[in-house]
Structures are given as C-alpha cells and as structure tokens.
Amino acid sequence: MPIASLVITLDEREPLRGAALGRLVEDSRVDLGEAKGLYLPVVVDTKTALEGAELVEELLSTPGVLGIDVVRIDFDCDEEAS
C-alpha cells in the first residue's frame, strides 16, 4: 500500500476548518497528526497510487482545505505494481 506524508493547509475560518477536519476524521485512510496553526500533518494509506491521487483530489475540493503539500510518498507496496 502506498503511504503518503502530507501537510494540509486549513482555512482559518472556524466553520470551514471544522468541516474539513470532520471530513478528514471520517476517512479511515487518513491518520491525523497534531495541527500547528493552520497546518495539519497527515499520513494517507491507500491500496494503490491511483487511489491516493484520487483521494488528494477529493481533499483539495473539500471546503476548508486550502492546499496540500506532499512531503513523501512510499510506493514500495503499491498493489497496482504487483
């Protein structure tokens, strides 16, 4: 399974920030770290690289998510590559 380390930039407006956090908490593929201001480190664990890319696109369209920075992606366990 590809594992990606990301940093999500959240909106400073509380209603949007809360909505984004609610979306993230509901997704079992996303593990949240400790927020530092508007920046939230997360780890995403998906079955394939394509699923991971689609998830990032979904998150980018989530109200309250302003941006996503990729820190690292480990493709060693990509089920598509097997």
Image (cartoon, rainbow, N blue to C red):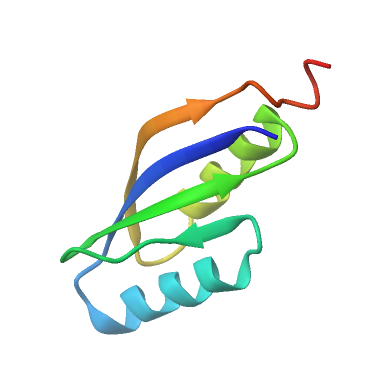
Compared to residue 35, the image places residue 57 above or below, namely above
Give coordinates of residue 74: x percent, y percent: 54, 26
Which image quarter is the C terminus in? top right
x 51%, y 59%: residue: 31
Which of 81 and 22 lies nearest the eye of the viewer?
81
Instruction: Point out the residue furthest to the right here.
Output: 82
x 50%, y 37%: residue: 4
Instruction: Point out the residue furthest to the front here.
Output: 76
Compared to residue 3, the image places residue 59 above or below, namely below
Q: How many marks?
A: 0
Give coordinates of residue 57: x percent, y percent: 54, 43
Q: Quadrant of residue 76?
A: top right
Relative placement, left or right, of 12 versus 46 is: left
Which image quarter is the N terminus in? top right
x 69%, y 38%: residue: 51
x 26%, y 82%: residue: 14
Instruction: Point out the residue furthest to the top here.
Output: 81
Give coordinates of residue 23: x percent, y percent: 53, 70
Relative placement, left or right, of 4 versus 29 is: left
Which of 17 and 6 lies nearest the eye of the viewer?
6
Q: Quadrant of residue 63?
A: bottom left
Compared to residue 34, the image places residue 5 above or below, namely above
